[in-house]
Amino acid sequence: MTGDTTDPQGTAALRPSSRVTLDDVARHAGVSSATASRALGDHPHVAEATRRRVREAAALLDYVASPEATRLAGGPTGRVAVLVPHPSRWFFGELIEGLEAELRAAELDLVLFRVGGPEERHAFFARLPARRGVDAVVVLAFAVDEVEHARLASLGVVVVAAGGRVASYPSVGIDDHRAGRQAVDHLLHLGHRRIGMLAGGDEQRLSPDPDGRASAWRAALRDAATEPDDDLVVTVPWDGEGGAEGMSRLLGLRAPPTAVFAHCDEMALGAMRTLRRAGLRVPEDISVIGIDDHPLAALTDLTTVAQPVREQGRRAGAMVLDTLRGGPPPRVPPAEMLPTRLVLRGTTSPPGVPR
Amino acid sequence: MTGDTTDPQGTAALRPSSRVTLDDVARHAGVSSATASRALGDHPHVAEATRRRVREAAALLDYVASPEATRLAGGPTGRVAVLVPHPSRWFFGELIEGLEAELRAAELDLVLFRVGGPEERHAFFARLPARRGVDAVVVLAFAVDEVEHARLASLGVVVVAAGGRVASYPSVGIDDHRAGRQAVDHLLHLGHRRIGMLAGGDEQRLSPDPDGRASAWRAALRDAATEPDDDLVVTVPWDGEGGAEGMSRLLGLRAPPTAVFAHCDEMALGAMRTLRRAGLRVPEDISVIGIDDHPLAALTDLTTVAQPVREQGRRAGAMVLDTLRGGPPPRVPPAEMLPTRLVLRGTTSPPGVPR
DNA sequence: ATGAAAGCGCTAACAG
DNA sequence: CTGTTAGCGCTTTCAT
């Protein structure tokens, strides 16, 4: 079209994005495929002019390298695995969305692996290296043990964690302790002293400080000169049913709390159902606060501590890129902590006067 | 270990799952790599005894074929792309979860692509063939036009839709019209006649009957000898905010409805917030019903029409497998419809007596 | 700075 | 039924 007379078949340009190979590009640019490979791969020792010509040819022909060939020849796969406990929960969906956006922009494909329990996780680590199909793995909200991490590292697979943090590899998350303090301190400032806690049951959760949220509750109470009462904490699954169940246990106490701090919004919502069914009003009879700022929290007027989930996914993606592009990871793996903030809505108020 | 004296290096068995190649297996079984390939690939014309020996050698060496080499040599990639509008929404998360389970069981990897608007979708279709990295693509809840579909088909890529159905390729979904009837008929049976509808704004949604839910509303009303009043239908985004916004518009009507049918639970929940803020009680002052049976519907006592979302994902996965494994697809693409069912909870009741 | 050539691990004719 | 021989498309020494 543009005066191209070197295409022997004259067809390359006619079937764009069909099966243009590196050779096509090379021929088009008048160089060898080796040079074309170097030019496209940003290798040193390639004349600037050549690099440009190759780039143009590639763009013109709409060339895209075959991932299989690249990988087979020793290059990266352009794929990153993401291990997710529960793809259908909002928290994970957001994480994935952020991650996908970041990776997509860098032309990396995101391969999803649902990994529920520890057994599934082990199965994954046992098989993945064999399939050697990814350049990096992003672990969402749970930990990977030293052995597994070492295994991947030795295989040249980058590991990054999101939705929590871990000592041995780069991670993004929030400061759980701080988030917990924001929630409990809010309740304390309102005047509550008998504060219950719906703690998320540890599904091998990720964190160096395994229960920053729980420890925050203790610390906050102590700072308010109130001795934490362990009867007020119940540990339940991280979902609505868990919260509902936990709340009824709390209600069964001789002296129920006047406010409840749930480790996540779903649990808080579950607690609210129990309260509603028990004929108790929120916040008049009892206050409730969660963590997350789930979209439904806004719909239910739930007071909560918001955390930037999608952003965590994005940052994790950026970490993967940094590590993949720029040589070896820093000696001390970064553990980014994104800010959380209290979102006042309608489920908290000063403790009501007893009837 | 087992008297193996043919391994020249004697190392193959020492580094299991490291980089055992087909050649290793072949050597171990005393055959050529071609035969080994046939044996493993269940090809005809291989002596049963040979096949067994090769299989054993493969198992012993913990052999796993290199996906890249396989693909490069013309085989399938073992990967399927899934196009998702909003990974973080419960509906899509469930679909993905079901799909992943089914594909994983068949050793297929799920590559996630977030595809929001039509432009993104086009970008995807324009690039995918070039990347030729997947054997199939599963489209979640939106349509693919004829051109795009033909393009993929000609490239040998299987296309399946889930979360709705479409004429030109296999799909799984629910009968939207029927689901809508279940919801509206319920309201009608309760005695409501002035029924509002919060319709989901069409984000190029998938369905041959683009708004089965909306048409159900009309049909149900007519069957109840009530002329549908278009003022009672507002079209808004498929989320809580959309529902909240739509509800306030409905409340602004000269004669507001006594019941509202929302196209999905999130919208219903949004509507409930508006009602609560307006000081109206649900269901005493106004009834609300949704579709989905989102986990939070149970927590908020929302009456709804449940649909088996995860199951839809699973069925879509099965369709992919069927098409991939068993030759060409049937002439008439199957359009499976999974059953929905009314779930009675606390947000609907007979219309209250006017004050 | 660039080219030639040798694979990466597997499948697919084509011969025996 | 099984072995031989070519590649698939790309990266990489090793020369030049």
Image: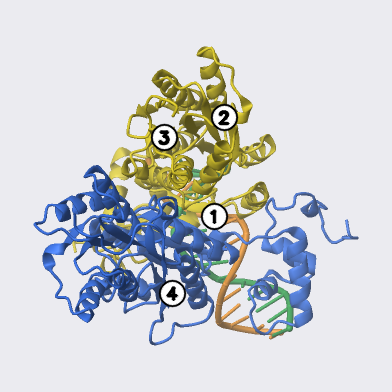
Chain colours: A blue, B yellow, C green, D orange
Q: Picture coordinates of residue B315 (x, y %)?
A: 41, 35
Label 3 – label 4 distance at C-alpha: 39 Å
Q: Picture coordinates of residue B228 (x, y %)?
A: 59, 21
Q: Is residue B138 visible?
A: no
User: Residue B286's quadrant in the figure?
Assistant: top left
From the viewer's perspective, tell me whether residue A323 is left or right of residue A106: left
From the viewer's perspective, tell me whether residue A321 is left or right of residue A166: right
The residue located at (50%, 62%) in the rendering is A98
- Residue assigned mark 4: A338
Q: Picture coordinates of residue C9 (x, y %)?
A: 44, 60
Q: Amino acid at mark 4?
A: Leu
Pick whichever, B105 or A72, lies toward us: B105
Label 3 – label 1 distance at C-alpha: 30 Å
Residue at disc 3, secondary structure: helix
What chain does badge 3 belong to? B
Q: Quadrant of the N terminus of chain B?
A: bottom left
Please tell me whether mark 2 or mark 4 is closer to you in this view: 2
Residue at disc 2, secondary structure: loop
Please say if A261 is above or below D3. below
- Residue assigned mark 1: B72
Label 2 – label 3 distance at C-alpha: 44 Å
Please tell me whether mark 3 or mark 4 is closer to you in this view: 4
Please tell me whether mark 3 or mark 1 is closer to you in this view: 3
Q: Amino acid at mark 1?
A: Leu
- Residue assigned mark 3: B315
Pick whichever, B91 or A298, lies toward us: A298
What chain does badge 1 belong to? B
Label 1 – label 4 distance at C-alpha: 43 Å
Q: Amino acid at mark 2?
A: Ala
